[in-house]
Structures are given as structure tokens and as C-alpha cells.
Amino acid sequence: MNSSIDKDMSGLLLRKTVSDVTGEMNKLGKELETNVELDDELLQAAECECCGLKEECTKEYITNIRNSHSGKWVCGLCSEVVKERLKHEPIITIEEAVSTHRNFCQEFNSTTRLNPKLSLACAMRNIAKKSGEKRRNNSSSSKMITRSSSCVPRIDYNMK
């Protein structure tokens, strides 16, 4: 620790203390600034071609992603969606899977983000429609238990 003694106007002695840590922190701060500048040179901004998300990645990572997705850079989330689509639809190519997901993202951004209340109503309508279709399909293929019209309580199995 460095200290210096100064006199104030009233003649009292004041001590000023400066820590050695401050000097070390200044040196460390300058080193960090140079590291950040070097990192900026290594990092490159990349925009997902499906959803439009922007990330800073190394050039090597960007090249690897583009090579594995037929020349298109996709973010991690979109990449997982493309993988799932390939898993469930094995007859499509990776270009088709990326293109399909990109079209879905563009439709979502142009409708849902612009009017979320309308998209919620449409989603609820689709859920109700699917639920109704599912009930109709299940009722026609399953057994219905009904009561007979006689006084004797018994159950008839009617197949429709």
C-alpha cells in the first residue's frame, strides 16, 4: 500500500491511501480489453435463415453448421426442429426439411406475431376441430354401451 500525507486548509493531517490492487485491476482491465478486441475478430454475426435469430459465433462453427444444413446457417433451436422432421419423415432431404421449417417460421412471423389474439382463436378452432374428428373416429370404431328398453336392467353391446 502506498500512502501520502497531505495537509488540509485547517492544518490537520490527512492521509491518502492507494491500494496496490487498484493498479493491478487497471492492468487486468487493459488485458481484458485486448482479449475482447481479439474475440471480436474471431466472432462473426450469423443470422438464422429460418427464424431470423442473430448470434455471434466463430467462423469455424458457422462453417460446420452450413456444411451440415446444405449451405444454410440455422440456429440451434431450428436445427433441432429440422432433425425431428428428418426423424419423422425419413423420405425428405435436409434441404426440404430446412425449407419447410423456414416457410413455417415465415408464416408464424407474418400472422401470429402481428395478431396474437387472432392466432390464439385460430389455434383453439383447430384444436376443437381435431378433437371433434377424433371423437367421431373413436365412436365409430369402439363399442357403445347402452341400456335396453325393457324393464329388466341389462346392458346390450351395440356395434355401430
Image: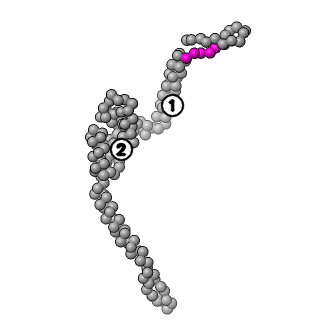
Q: Is residue 72 above or below residue 144?
A: below
Residue 62 highlighted magenta (yes or no): no
Residue type at numbered disc 1: Met
**Label annotation for residue 124:** 1
Judge depth for marks 2 and 1 and give the one in front. Answer: 2
Residue at point 29%, 40% (across, down)? 68
Label 2 CA crowd tier, 10 Å (few <14, some 14–19, many 20+) = some
Tell me if 24 is positioned left or right of 131 in this view: left
Q: Is residue 145 magenta?
A: yes
For marks 2 and 1, give the CA distance: 29 Å
Q: Position of residue 149 (x, y in %)?
A: 68, 9
Q: Residue at x 67, y 10 (%)?
A: 148
Residue closest to the eye, 153 or 135: 153
Number of the label disc, if any, that sits on residue 75: 2
Q: Which residues are magenta?
A: 142-147
Residue 103 visible, this orientation: no
Q: As drawn, which residue projects farthest toward the top?
A: 150
Secondary-structure class at tag 1: helix
Of callouts 2 and 1, the N-terminal one: 2
The answer to whether one can see residue 13 in this image is yes
Mark 2 belongs to which amino acid?
A: Cys
What's the mark number on residue 20? none
The picture quadrant where one finds residue 88 is top left
In the rendered image, residue 11, in percent from the top left (x then y), is placed at 49, 91
Mark 2: which secondary structure? loop
For the C terminus, give its image quadrant.
Answer: top right
Which residue is rendered at x = 27% and y = 46% of the image? 63
Say left or right for 139 vs 34. right
The x, y position of residue 86, in whole percent, is 36, 33
Quadrant holding the N terminus: bottom left
